Amino acid sequence: MSKKFYKLESKNLNAFYGSFHALKNINMAMEEKAVTAFIGPSGCGKSTFLRTLNRMNDYIDGFRVEGDILLDGRDIYGRDVRVDELRKEVGMVFQKPNPFPKTIFENVVYGLRIQGIKDKRVLAETAENSLRQTALWEEVKDKLDQSALALSGGQQQRLCIARALAISPSVILMDEPTSALDPISTAKIEELIYELKQAYTIIIVTHNMQQAGRVSDYTAFFYIGELVEYAKTKTLFTSPKHERTQNYITGRFG
Ligand SMILES: Nc1ncnc2c1ncn2[C@@H]1O[C@H](COP(=O)(O)OP(=O)(O)OP(=O)(O)O)[C@@H](O)[C@H]1O
Ligand SMILES: [Mg+2]
């Protein structure tokens, strides 16, 4: 019998900041071309876990992981792994839109420039495609040479998603991508996530239970470094197995 394929798998993953044990034996397999949401109270380890998936925590002094994270079956903490290659495959979008103080165009093609791509046509095509994918093209096509910092917060976040898409990742990590946005921009990003999952595996951290319900196929509930419950989103929200999950999703703490 063939084993089911998962895009990402966490196996006996433990993470530490110095002597602080931030993630405790996380075992979890994430499906390809689906949206998986991480929920849980502040400080439970959602961002830490998300960031282990593309080794973003490598920069933090005293941080270390034990166990494995498999991407397409391959351990991303393995010795032969090049972190720059890994980050091309696993892109990231942050809580606050963080465009560079450059033009809209240069923001989108930033990753390509870093790779040394100079072909004007390739750059222009990639910029247009990525901006179309994030439904931003019509809004910015006449001002590609203007500063990205002049865009609205919601537009900036879609630009940051376009920047992530431009280097053709297969996984996109999003850490509370709408928490700094108004409801209309939030709705646009949620629609976008829905579209993007046809082609990408998306992992999103959110504090917003309604958002998890709207955008995700699977939801994982974390509590003080532990994965308490992981199920199809509908199941987790309608019939959670654990009392802690129940209490959290009904707003009794958090
Ligand atoms: N750079 C760091 N150094 C030391 N401890 C850290 C660091 N970053 C996070 N922690 C600790 O690890 C734990 C998990 O933090 P993390 O940021 O992953 O939580 P979170 O679930 O994303 O919370 P929030 O919802 O507030 O963003 C917390 O106890 C936090 O204080
Ligand atoms: Mg966080």
Image: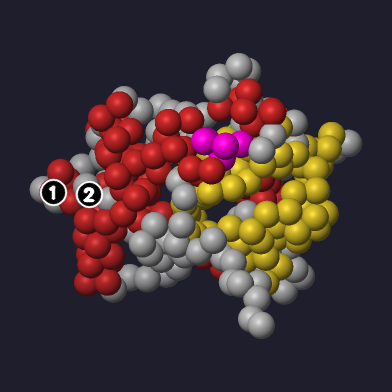
Residue at the farthest left position: 142
Query: At 75% across and 31% down in the image, what residue appears?
Result: 224
* Cα gap from disc 1 to disc 2, whole angstroms: 7 Å
Tell me: 115 left or right of 58: left
Can residue 89 be seen here? yes
* Quarter of the figure with residue 67: bottom right
**In the rendering, which numbered label is found on residue 24?**
none
User: Which image quadrant: the N terminus?
Assistant: bottom right
Q: Which residue is mark 1?
A: 138
* Quarter of the figure with residue 244: top right
Q: Which residues are magenta?
A: 236-240
Q: Position of residue 100 (x, y in %)?
A: 39, 42
Ligand 2 neighbours mark 1 (CB distance < 8 Å): no
Q: Position of residue 174 (x, y in %)?
A: 48, 44
Q: Which residue is mark 2?
A: 135
Q: Is residue 166 above or below residue 73?
A: above
Query: At 67% across and 50% down in the image, what residue appears?
Result: 52
